Amino acid sequence: MKFTKVALIGGTGFVGRRLTHVLANLGHQCRVITRHSHRHPELKLSAELVQANPYNLDELKQAVKGCDAVINLVGILNPANKREGFREVHVGITENAIEACHAAGIKRYIQMSALQADQDAGSSTYLKTKGEAENRVRAMCQPGINFTIFRPSVIFGPGDGFLNRFAGLMKIPGPLPLACAKSRFAPVYIEDVVKAFAQSVNDRSTFGQAYELCGPEEYTLREVVELLGTLTGRKKLIIELPDFAARIQARILQNLPGKLFTMDNYNSLQTASVCSDNGLARLGIDAASMSAIATNLFLHQDKAGKLDRLRARARHED
């Protein structure tokens, strides 16, 4: 049996938009399930948009009818409100997605998790609930649903929320007070993540498997910021905050709009986001280097920015 009609929950996010495009190019019929279909007209070129609330099991059952596979990409780094906390998003939507698969007779399910996800993780609610969701997948997919779980490290690429966030911080005058500067990552390129998801849809060898996804290089957070300083031409003094100061910074920033840094982010950063067994190699994917990709990405942005400034100056002079 080939799985050709794919429903994506969380398909409007950073990974989901790119994955939808790639799946469509491979000949899959994609259905993106979203609460706000009118906000994503660009996806209509690659997918059918279906408006449904993934917190509502009845709506989700209807939304996935007629599909062969479901991919759940939903995840949050910080809750938007009390009603949509870590457990409601990571565990609740996972439970609904699998229940909907059983109801619709769908035999293929793929879950986006996170590197170091563990229900018994330290004090990070993010990692705990991602781990609890994985346990739900293993328990609820039996019998009858073939599942695969992916656990990426931090994902980078054009428009990401990782490199671009720190690149934005580099624009702020003065030194940069950096919490958890020694935290370790193996950033993975979005195109590699998408390739792993896409090729696994009909790859029976991935059934029942979990894959850690990492890039070929490991960095501390300080090294990431230093690399961005070099690439953007905005090198600045980095002040590594001691642990007590990092906690104070998190407690302050988590109460400000945008939640730039929270206590749960701090707790997550206490666990190294690096692979013990890189699943990209197991899948035959040659992982792309962040240093090479970021160089092209930010040099291109810098050239585009300079061109925009020249155009603005020319308009002003006219």
Image: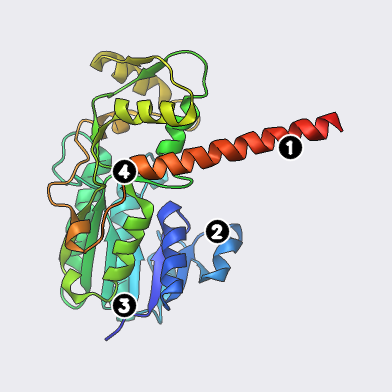
User: How far apart are the two marked residues, 1 and 4, measured between alpha carbons?
Assistant: 36 Å
Q: Residues within 10 Å of mark 4 (few under 14, many from 20)?
A: many
Q: Which residue is mark 2?
A: 36
Write down the residue under mark 3: 103
Q: Earlier in the sequence, mark 1 or mark 4?
A: 4
Depth order, front residue of 193/92:
193
Q: Which residue is mark 1?
A: 311
- Discs 2/1, front: 1
Which quarter of the image is occupied by the N terminus? Answer: bottom left
Q: Residue at x 40, y 55 (%)?
A: 15
Three-letter amino acid code of the residue under disc 4: Val
Residue 307 can be seen, yes or no: yes
> In this rendering, does residue 73 appear at all?
no
Residue 70: mark in rendering: none
Give the spatial CA distance, label 2 vs label 3: 24 Å
Tell me: residue 262, above or below residue 126.
above
Q: Nearer the viewer, mark 1 or mark 4?
A: 1
Amino acid of disc 2? His
Which of discs 2 and 3 lies nearer the camera? The answer is 2
Nearer to us: label 4 or label 3: 4
Gap in Å between the C-alphas at discs 2 and 4? 26 Å
Q: Furthest residue to the bottom?
A: 1
Foreground label between 1 and 3: 1
So how many labels did they put on this image?
4
For label 3, count other residues whose C-alpha is less than 10 Å away and answer few (under 14), some (14-19) or many (20+).
some
> Circles 2 and 3: CB distance less than 8 Å?
no
Q: State the image coordinates of residue 213 (x, y, percent, origin top left).
A: 24, 52
Q: Is residue 133 above or below residue 316?
A: below
Quadrant assignment, res 123: top left
Label 2 and label 1: CA atoms lie apart by 36 Å
Residue 154's label in the rendered image is 4
